[in-house]
Amino acid sequence: MEQESVVAKPRDVMPEGAKTLPARYYTDPVLFAAELDGLFGRMWFHAGRSEEASRPGQYFVREFNGHDIVVTRNSAGAVRAFHNVCRHRGTRLCTGPSGQLSGSLQCPYHAWTYDLDGRLIGAPHMDEVPHFRKADYPLLPVHADEWDGHVFLNLTDTPEPLHAQLGALVEKFRDWRMQDLRLGRRIAYDVKANWKLVIQNYNECLHCPNLHPALNRLSHYLSGENEPLRATYMGGRMDLRPGVDTLSWDGTCPRAFLPGLSAEDRRRVYYYAIFPNLLLSLHPDYMMTHTLWPIAADRTVNVCEWHFHPSELARGGFDPADCVEFWDMTNRQDWQVCELSQAGIASRAYVPGPYSNREDLLYAFDRFVVDFHERYAERRA
Amino acid sequence: MEQESVVAKPRDVMPEGAKTLPARYYTDPVLFAAELDGLFGRMWFHAGRSEEASRPGQYFVREFNGHDIVVTRNSAGAVRAFHNVCRHRGTRLCTGPSGQLSGSLQCPYHAWTYDLDGRLIGAPHMDEVPHFRKADYPLLPVHADEWDGHVFLNLTDTPEPLHAQLGALVEKFRDWRMQDLRLGRRIAYDVKANWKLVIQNYNECLHCPNLHPALNRLSHYLSGENEPLRATYMGGRMDLRPGVDTLSWDGTCPRAFLPGLSAEDRRRVYYYAIFPNLLLSLHPDYMMTHTLWPIAADRTVNVCEWHFHPSELARGGFDPADCVEFWDMTNRQDWQVCELSQAGIASRAYVPGPYSNREDLLYAFDRFVVDFHERYAERRA
Amino acid sequence: MEQESVVAKPRDVMPEGAKTLPARYYTDPVLFAAELDGLFGRMWFHAGRSEEASRPGQYFVREFNGHDIVVTRNSAGAVRAFHNVCRHRGTRLCTGPSGQLSGSLQCPYHAWTYDLDGRLIGAPHMDEVPHFRKADYPLLPVHADEWDGHVFLNLTDTPEPLHAQLGALVEKFRDWRMQDLRLGRRIAYDVKANWKLVIQNYNECLHCPNLHPALNRLSHYLSGENEPLRATYMGGRMDLRPGVDTLSWDGTCPRAFLPGLSAEDRRRVYYYAIFPNLLLSLHPDYMMTHTLWPIAADRTVNVCEWHFHPSELARGGFDPADCVEFWDMTNRQDWQVCELSQAGIASRAYVPGPYSNREDLLYAFDRFVVDFHERYAERRA
């Protein structure tokens, strides 16, 4: 049941005594490591965009949680990912964050060389070593797959298909034709807060009147509708106020709406947190993504990107400042308050506090987190 | 028995074999945490000056040992302190080091609002939550009290009165009318040394001829008299040399003496370490305070302030450089040698060394420290 | 059996399945501490050059592994080393990295004073302390000795003689008259890699064609001959290509060859890793040394020095840029690839890889390392 106006529909009443989590979920390095291992280490996580590895040998590198992974495309056009570790003496192969390979990866130390499928094809002087076979030393692979222009990685040996994890989202957002969009701007934020506080901040707008008056003028904080929490994502939509065409400095939209959107979807912004690390914000005329990289219990690198239709990017004088600067200001307001929350929760005086009914997704997410840790601890025991 | 001349009175002979403490008292993070918990966490500690929260809603924030505390004054004029943690989702309320509240504290996240006594008076949308009562969510209080213009805090639930901890000091320094004095200058030093080395440095002048020739020219290092160590403070006085009026670059005093001082006290400087963190240095014409904030076993932030009589501060062209720069130089000499001591004590080759009879307060302080740790360990066992 | 041409002599075939070490040998702080304690803490280690403490009272300080050691020369001309820790209250005595003492060491705090043999000769006010005797409080000594102009230190109480550790090297390199050489240039590198990776990088030239094309043009990577690993050092020699006179930008040699070298040795460069921390590179006309200071499992400060014959240094317009800049470039190539190896080995995906027969010294060194840790663990058990 969708809801069309900006009049608030009362959310379901939450259980009596619903409170925030104890501090340890945001401060304990052991619980943080469990999340890296059990969530990020088992689920498909967002790593970048297909356009960053669009041609054979074009690559980007993601360093995360003790891994360093090269994502590229093989000569057949399939996305491929490898641990960035030479099988000879462990040296990193790709030394920059991105680039274009000339058909192979070569180690800078002793020139071991691998093709774009990771096969070892050159190893100087190793032919003198009895029983050495190149076939035994391919690059160690990482599972990689794409959803509509988004590249995901999975560190397990035999992951379920990416689309199984994404579930109904694949169909739900098909009209946005995300694979057609191209990067217009990227800003990386270093946020001194736990990654879950960023997700929680993203999933309620109760703070908008106080923290984001500009946003609240474009989209009423009580508008829209949340979906119930799903196993692998949560989110909802908000409505643009009458006369507002998109989220930008003044609510006007200097770009064409994305082709294929319904009249309804041209009046809405969808906000979905796709676990564990992609925040997908679909506007009538652009897509904003946040990719979260948890660095420590109290620190998250948050890469925000704005993607546009190529016909807009190709237009002379294309300038996304109206929406980039609007969201950059809003982002910074959010990260600052996330950092204030992290600091306060880390205070020895912090005790869990009561949720309002407007924080339903947060309470559901907390249950997801607590359940995860219980199951994780059980598996360990 | 006070002593009037600069001729040295022999100190009592110390026990044979009196030596400095083993290195672990200055380097072990476990012992450091015990001191934070058992000394700073149980005693009244110095947090600032009454004039920093002199009007209702004027506030300052102190971050220390995992706490973040707002100190302010309520509408009735009483000093009040609260943990700087919103009872909703833990966000810090006051984000700057000091300022003026407009009669209430409001959380920047969801606008929960508290009055100057900490009562929750606003909580948007919480009225929709069954059984929620504002009275259940006041700011968490911290005990605060004042002594003659100094603000002290206590983190225990039911502290003894501040004046019981201060004992005879209240009467002893009444003539200085410290509550009348006002801040003229503040310098914060970041000292890479254990806080106890700073206290030990403060409580002997055997190092003065070698390290502080300028100070020794104004006040002979063997002059004066130490009180025996008390349960909660230690100190003594030194005499100004003939012709010297105060401690300043040249020993002259461009200010009037503080009103109310005896002729005797106009010839002396009193140096008292008031445990755990206030060093109080009373000169004939000004008060210098050092407030120690232990950050790690090997690091102490040391906030030095110079306070003057308001009639001097009001005088046209008031300039405290003569005494501020004199002590700033002397401070820096002290902190440098404290850092050299910390580094040497942390060397694997360090072994305790013999005290001279001129280091009587240090030996007594060491016994206080050792006794504390024994009692602390017993309580834990 | 030495070999005269650049034609490669095949190295011995290594054991089947010879592989690099598991990651923990390069990343585990416990194994790192064992190496500091059991290797650096028991062997003679290189600390500097005799010329840095050539006159009585001339000194330099080395801070390493929780020690801070002053190396100087006494009035009789013998090298002396002391822990830089005053026996009174532990203060560091020498506060700069090097300098000239005026016949004694005086503590900056309370002026305790020691002669150049470490005897306490001044201690103000300690004569008032019953039973205090200066003879009981000398500076704590560290064993120091010299080999042909190199100063070595030993932290054990009763070390074997330095020359016993050096073995055949003393005789082997006598012709270079190293004690006559003088420092021309020093560059300190901060390398984010384990110290053993630096040693391994130094002991194979299989990487030279790929990483050091300039070096490989002067000295063929398959030339020369390695000695088998010795108990306390390993190394070998490489041959200069025909027409090349030394290792410099263009292979020409603007300096006279060192006096006393045979015609054979004028055509060679000797590379010896003298455990635990000296890399000695003897060229026909200069000596290059690298002194390794392990800081953490993943960090090594590497001090590189170029030493020349005094007659060259005395020559007007002496400029060692031809060899210094050549090796500085080569050094930086090496440290970068050491850092890439450290990063890759620290990746969770790293597994040991196969050695070629050209990495014989590395495999031998690995056995030395593994044996050390086994013996060390046994001693602890």
Image (cartoon, coloured by chain):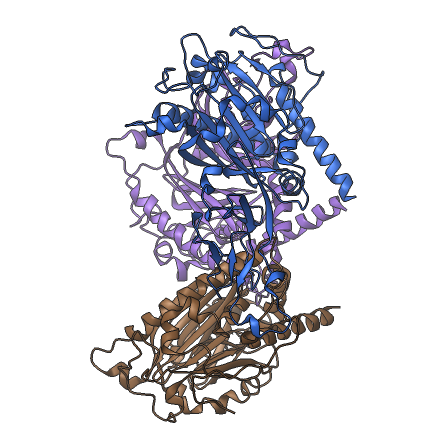
Chain colours: A purple, B brown, C blue
Is residue A308 depicted above or below A25 in this figure?
above
Q: In the rendered image, which quarter is residue A346 located in?
A: bottom right
Q: Which of B251/C129 is in front?
A: C129
Is residue B66 depicted above or below A367 in this figure?
below
State whether residue A239 appears in this view: yes
Is residue C186 depicted above or below A34 in this figure?
above
Q: Which of C363/B356 is in front?
A: B356
Is residue B95 found left or right of A44 in the rendered image? left
Q: Which of C7/A113 is in front?
A: C7
State whether residue A112 appears in this view: no
Q: Residue at x 34, y 52 (%)?
A: A242
Residue furthest front as drawn: C76
Q: Position of residue C20 (x, y in %)?
A: 65, 25
Q: Residue at x 43, y 87 (%)?
A: B5
Q: How many marks?
A: 0
Q: Position of residue C50 (x, y in %)?
A: 49, 38
Q: Position of residue C97 (x, y in %)?
A: 45, 47
Is residue A369 depicted above or below A170 in this figure?
below
Q: Position of residue B265 (x, y in %)?
A: 40, 89
Residue furthest left as drawn: B316
Quadrant, the C terminus of chain B: bottom right
